[in-house]
Amino acid sequence: MQGFINIHEASKLLRVSPRFLYEEVRRGNVPFIRIGRLLRFDPQEVLDYYKHSSQQGSEIKGKVKWQTN
C-alpha cells in the first residue's frame, strides 16, 4: 500500500468502527499524522498496531457482580 489513508479506510482495514479508532488515537495507541484538522494513517503502521494489539490480549477492568438466586 502506498500513501496515507483516512479514518474510515483505517477502520475498515482493522474491522473496527471509526469511533473506536478515534478513541485509540486519543489514548495514543495508534500512530497517525495530522494534516490541519484531518487525521491520516500509514497503512503499514495500522497493520502493525493490529498485530501488536492482538498479541497482547484484552484486559477487563471493573468489578464483577455475582448474581445469586
Image: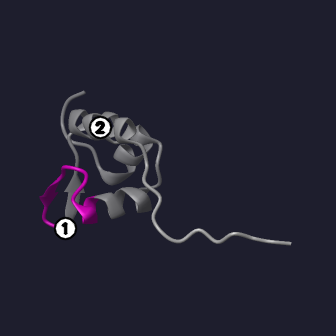
Image quadrant holding the C terminus, namely bottom right
Question: Quick one: which residue is furthest to the top in this view?
Answer: 1
Q: Secondary structure at mark 2?
A: helix
Instruction: Give how far across and how far down residue 16 sits, in percent.
Output: 46, 49
Relative to 17, is 37 on the left or the right?
Answer: left
Residue 50 in the image: above or below residue 28: above
Q: Quadrant of residue 25?
A: bottom left
Residue 22 in the image: above or below residue 6: below
Q: Quadrant of residue 9?
A: top left
Tell me what residue is drawn at x 14 percent, y 59 percent.
34
The magenta stretch spans which residues?
A: 25-37
Mark 2 Cα shell of 10 Å, populated few (<14), some (14-19), many (≥20): few
Relative to 5, is 23 on the left or the right?
Answer: right
Question: Quick one: which residue is furthest to the right in this view?
Answer: 69
The colour scheme of the drawn protein is one colour
Disc sitting over residue 52 in the figure: 2
Is 57 colored magenta in this rendering? no
Instruction: Give how far across and how far down residue 44 sits, in percent.
Output: 23, 32
Q: Which residue is mark 1?
A: 37
Is 31 colored magenta in this rendering? yes
Mark 1 Cα shell of 10 Å, populated few (<14), some (14-19), many (≥20): few
Tell me what residue is drawn at x 25 percent, y 54 percent.
29
